[in-house]
Amino acid sequence: DAKTTQPNSMESNEEEPVHLPCNHSTISGTDYIHWYRQLPSQGPEYVIHGLTSNVNNRMASLAIAEDRKSSTLILHRATLRDAAVYYCILRDGPGVYGGATNKLIFGTGTLLAVQP
Amino acid sequence: DGGITQSPKYLFRKEGQNVTLSCEQNLNHDAMYWYRQDPGQGLRLIYYSQIVNDFQKGDIAEGYSVSREKKESFPLTVTSAQKNPTAFYLCASSMRDAAGYTFGSGTRLTVV
């Protein structure tokens, strides 16, 4: 399974942009890059995903390097509610049915602290 | 509203007893997953199922069992063979080829 590497923790100030990095040097051509976040004692929440092109949605933007070996999750204006653990995950490769198994293999993520 | 429901939220059991955690989804998702999370750690995959009546072991399946008799349901049994069952258990679902995964709110199991 391809692995990701993230910083253990980051800090940001409220209403400033946050760039959360992720390295995935062993990514395969069919791996999608997923981001989830988790608040304490809650289940993870889907944030965004992408394959090759940069992606935007109402929560965040995902910038993917041209060689796909790294990516960055961008929160445009951090709020106190964005304080969470952010996971960068690669979808698993081919599985039993000849396609992706869709397994999510989690790392330890980045703990984002947002200061008022 | 569609979603994924885990019950109960908190569960206490005596050592040596089997216990079953419930996971139900009404999202019409094909695939369902069980993860375990220990304090300060990431999630680890226990079992997953891509289709009814079929499931595969994840990274830490020992001491656990599952069934997938209905598309909507994927119960997890924590057996007495699981050496350290106290943990936060999370269920998730997705379409087999879709991007977003929906997670439940979790069941915190404490074995005393």
Image (cartoon, grey):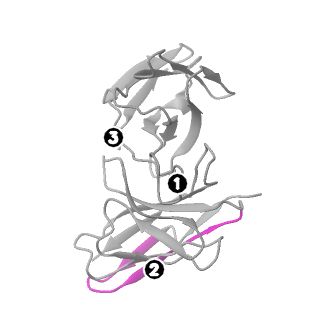
Residue B19 lies in the magenta-colored region:
yes
Relative vertical location of residue A72 with respect to residue B35 in this rendering, above or below: above
Q: What residue sits right under mark 3 in the picture?
A: A108
Relative vertical location of residue A104 with respect to residue B79 in this rendering, above or below: above
Local SS, label 1: loop
**Mark 3, chain letter?**
A
Local SS, label 3: loop
Q: Nearer the viewer, mark 3 or mark 1?
A: 1
Question: Are discs 3 and 1 located on one and the same chain?
Answer: yes
Separation of residues labelled 3 and 1 (CA atoms): 29 Å
Residue B94 or residue B8, whichever sits in front: B94
Q: What residue sits right under mark 2 in the picture?
A: B20
Residue type beneath disc 1: Gly
Question: Are discs 2 and 3 located on one and the same chain?
Answer: no
Q: Are marks 3 and 1 in contact (CB under 8 Å)?
A: no
Q: Are marks 1 and 2 in contact (CB under 8 Å)?
A: no
Q: Position of residue A36 (x, y in %)?
A: 51, 39
Instruction: Tell me the magenta residue range.
Output: B10-26
First-in-chain label (3 vs 1): 1
Residue type beneath disc 3: Thr
